[in-house]
Image (cartoon, coloured by chain):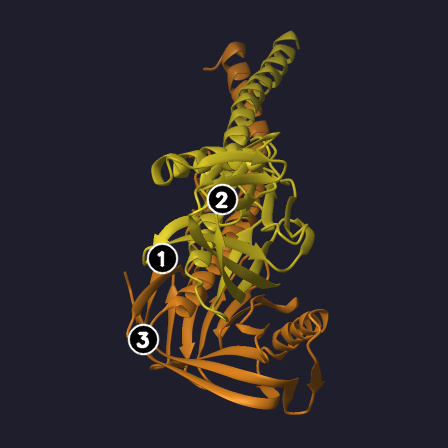
Chain colours: A orange, B yellow
Amino acid sequence: MLGNRGISVVVEASLVLAVLIPILLFLSLSYTRHALYVVEAQHVEKVKTAFFRLKSVIEESRHGEKVVITTPLGRDPIPNVVPFLPLLVGGTSPGAGVLSFDNSAGGRVIFYSQNSEYPDFQLVFENGAVIFSQEGGGETMLFPPVLVVRRGENIEVHHHTFQLLGENFQLSGGGEISLELLVENIFEERENRETLELFFPRGQNEDAWWEFLVVENSWLAQKDYFAQLNRDVDGFRLVIYGPMCYIHRQYVIKVGRSHP
Amino acid sequence: MEEGVSVVVFAVMMVMVIFLVFSAWYAGFAQSSIKKAEIEHMRKVEEQFRYLQSLVSGLRENGHSGTAEFQFSPLPPVGVLYTGRASAFWAEKEFENFPGLIGLEIGSLICPRVTYIYEGGAVLVKQGANVYMKYEPQALFFENGRLIYQEVRLEDNLSKVVGSGRIALVFFVENLIEENLVDKIYIWSRYPSAWKKYLYKIRDSMFPNASLEPLDNGWVLSLGADSTYVRRILCLSFLAC
């Protein structure tokens, strides 16, 4: 038989639990949501850095050189700040991402991340540029390709293009993935010209390329070079007026994959 | 009735104690998480300036190019409502003879404000009024028996960009000028005091008989009337994206 004292202790314990459990649940859910935002933001930055490394390593590579780039596929798990909180919301599994290689149209390395809180994003390395796009947020050129003009006796236009070869693949999951890049060839051609027309065909990331060309065109105007940018049905044309020496360097790179 | 009231009071007090302990723990946790993220970002920025230094030292011919990126803000720490403080990035070339500089002033909440500066091939760190050289340039060296003074000069300006994202710069060699000169080597700088230790070290190890004098905006190293050297100017342009 419980006396008055016993009943009051049970009521007291129930009251404490009745207050604590909703508070803990609320904190736990808020924390999980907030942590997902943060971990996803960190993941975006890590993948951007990996793609920057991909671009810069390729630019600096020499004929026959082999380089390995590692990129995180999925986001990290949510850290256990308070050990028991994740138990209340069902664990903190890591996120997943997809890395694929498409060998059509000069080759593209594509990273696709499925997010819970932020809109999904995609990073593409194509033709020496890294393009970032997000669902509903358009696309932007994160790291531009090398297309520079300098004054010599005449002007010199340096343009680097990249052809990526290899078998198509698509890998998804968490953890990290390593890409192997082998520079099979580097061709350089020099040609004297009166005018140069650089053609950029419309493609999946045409808005980012257009945005880049607008910036490039205004930079050329600011430096007193004569250039003209046209937007046609089939693509974009950047015409640079000379006389000039056009120095075109094309990298031929074989892309492979390996799990660390 | 009295028993019931005491139970409620006890429950409320228990919750208050728990909240008090949690608040004290959380304040410390938030502080240390933000500090850790800011220190990590500072390390990252230093790495990016070091990369810029090695990138530029590898640009040796007209038209050579390379890309550098700079991250403005730390990765947000988990478990903390962190708004951060904006950082400022700029590139400037004030006068004709000056090498110009690239600066990133890190906006920190807890750590002191630090500015990383790339000037004339060196990486400088500015904190308050103090500026010191973090990574030395390869400004003076011998090549095939010739003394070379290599100057890195920026040809473009970039007005201050303030924010929390990142910026990429495609650098390329606009021009490579070499001229044969005699006696005095002028080393121009916006922060001459930061170059003092490095230049004295160079003078003591390479030219013990030379004199080193400070100027308002730099230093002059007098080698002697018979001494010749090559002044190599690497003119760098960049495109920001």
Camera-side residue of A35 and B210 = B210
Mark seen at residue A175: 1
Earlier-in-chain disc, 1 versus 3: 3
**Going by the image, does A63 lie left or right of A17?**
left
Residue A111 in the image: state x and y as whole percent.
46, 68
Q: Mark 1 belongs to which subunit?
A: A
Question: What is the quadrant of residue B199 in the picture?
Answer: top left
Q: Is residue A13 visible?
A: yes
> Residue B123, labelled with which disc?
2
Label 1: state its secondary structure.
Answer: loop
A130 on left or right of B58: right
For label 2, the SS is strand
> Which one is in front, B184 or A89?
B184
What chain is tagged by disc 3? Answer: A
Q: Is residue A201 visible?
A: no
Q: CA distance from mark 1 to mark 3?
A: 31 Å
Kindly report which numbered mark, 2 or 1, lies closer to the viewer in this rendering.
Answer: 2
From this viewpoint, which residue is outermost toward the front?
Answer: B226
Q: Amino acid at mark 2?
A: Val
Q: Read off the chain for label 2.
A: B
Judging by the rendered image, the residue that carries numbered circle 3 is A63
Going by the numbered disc 3, the residue's amino acid type is: His
Give the CA separation, mark 3 to mark 2. 31 Å
Task: Specify the quadrant that holds the N terminus of chain B.
Answer: top right
Depicted A122 relative to depicted B50: above or below: below
Picture residue at 65% right of the left edge, 76% below the top: A213
| In this rendering, the label closer to the viewer, 1 or 3 | 3
Task: Return the residue nearer the eye: A138 or A186.
Answer: A186
